[in-house]
Amino acid sequence: MHLVDLLQQLTPSPTVLLLLTALIALVESLALVGLLVPGVVLITAVASLAGHHQVGAPPMMVAAFVGAVIGDGLSFWLGATQRERVTGLWPLSRYPEWLAQGARFFRRHGSLSVFLGRFVGPVRPVIPLIAGMMDMAPRRFLIANLTSAALWAPAYVLPGYLLGRTWRRLPGIPEALEPWLAGLGALIVALALVFSWLRHQTHHDGLIYRAMADLLHRHPRGQRLWQALARTREREAPLGTWLLLLTSLTALSALTLLVLQQGGPLPMDRRLDTLMGGLTLPSLSVLGETLARLGDLYGVIALILPWGLWWLARGRLDVLVHFGGGLFGIAALNTLGKALIGRVRPDTPLHLADSFSYPSAHTSTAVVLYGLAAAFIARELPLSRRFWAYWGAIAIIVPMALSRLVLGVHWLSDLIGGALLGLVVCALVQLAWQRRPHRTLRPCPWPLLGAASLALVAARIAWLGPV
């Protein structure tokens, strides 16, 4: 069975899309669980699929409405029946500030907080729980629950739905390419969700972390191994980073062996390259060229120069060494990998005449650059908001990688190999960083440095040629 046929079979039916929408809305509104689930991203993805497959917008909004009402209702019931025991449940047992923040919001706005809290991200899953704990009248809660859900559902469903409907109207996209794009989007969302879930579970209060700690501490050798992972008795073992390193390194090794054994492009590479050749969207080519310049040597220098100068002025050589080590390391590994494997590109423009295909240097460099940036930013954020840093990095990396397919200079497996190689380097840099405690990165003029980076990148795209 071809991959494209499998993707077509995996496309959700209208009924499944409606059930997924209701389930996501329920989970996002549910106390405790909703704190850890990126519901906005999931609903946008499912609504886009619904718009693409012409599922009606009203049923989608009704499904989101029903799920949101049930989720808030269950949270209210949990708060009313469990009360003080709620504080002992994970993750509130580890992060009591979430409950305190919601309580302050409830005291400030009273009964109106149930209505307002639906649209305020950090307190959305907690407010119904607190309303139940504080004996809010069930009738008043029900009115606020229904009215807020009636406004929330279209606000969250329609943007993604319109995106899916607009996609169907784009000219120049071969019909055979649509399952690939739908499958790619589903795969990216699934992998990002798995990553978010594992990141929480490998935190020192997560299930995987506690299970691993209990297992190893039963034996003397296991205790020594755990201490080696944590480096000291007092510090948390970076289990999530080790897991990222092992999984990405294993996947990279397997893919590279497959590429070497094939001796050329894989069947999926050839088929997707043929489909991409049928695109007749000039704007995509322009976007691909822009992203190519953003991700090359000049573009990377333009992005990091203001930040490097700032950290140098602040005396933060630790940040510069780790960030620079990651970028120099990925550059060396890309050069070595291309030379050893010697895979020919689908199309070789003049400025890439001496360069091979596997792995994709643009993809691997983007993963290291934006992945490390996301990791450093996430350390400065509360646990409940860290996923935004990683999702932001994904939103930049994916178009950067796909632009190589649009330009026809890489095979699909080149992008996958580059992404895996970048994750390996990210994990190694993070393990090196986590060996000892470091000072916070604050204060830092994030807006000013970001604006300087954007100005330099714009100048690079406008005035310098490809490199």
Image: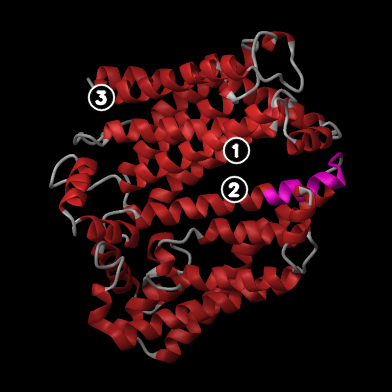
- Residue at (52, 16) in percent of width and height: 336
Q: Which mark is residue 295?
A: none
**In 3D space, how far apart are the residues under numbered discs 3 and 2 (Cα atoms)?**
32 Å
- Residue at (29, 85) in percent of width and height: 82
Label 2 residue SS:
helix
Query: Where does label 2 land, which residue?
Result: 188
Residue count near mark 1 (Cα–Cα under 10 Å), binned few <14, some 14–19, many ≥20? some
Q: Are marks 1 and 3 in contact (CB under 8 Å)?
A: no
**x and y percentages locating residue 239 in the rendered image:** 31, 47
Query: Where does label 3 land, which residue?
Result: 318
Does the segment drawn in magenta span residue 398?
no
Relative to 272, does residue 410 appear above or below in the rendering?
A: above
**In 3D space, how far apart are the residues under numbered discs 1 and 2 (Cα atoms)?**
9 Å
Q: Quadrant of the C terminus?
A: top right
Q: Are marks 1 and 2 in contact (CB under 8 Å)?
A: yes
Report the colour scheme: secondary structure
Residue count near mark 2 (Cα–Cα under 10 Å), binned few <14, some 14–19, many ≥20? few
> In the figure, is residue 273 to the left or right of 233?
right
Q: Tell me the chief SS of the magenta region.
A: helix
> In the figure, is residue 52 to the left or right of 153?
right
Query: Where does label 1 land, which residue?
Result: 398
Which amino acid type is shown beneath numbered disc 2?
Answer: Ile
Query: Which of the 4 quarters of the picture holds residue 100?
Result: bottom left
Q: Which residues are magenta?
A: 172-183
**x and y percentages locating residue 69 in the rendered image:** 53, 79
- Residue at (83, 37) in percent of width and height: 275
Which amino acid type is shown beneath numbered disc 1?
Answer: Val
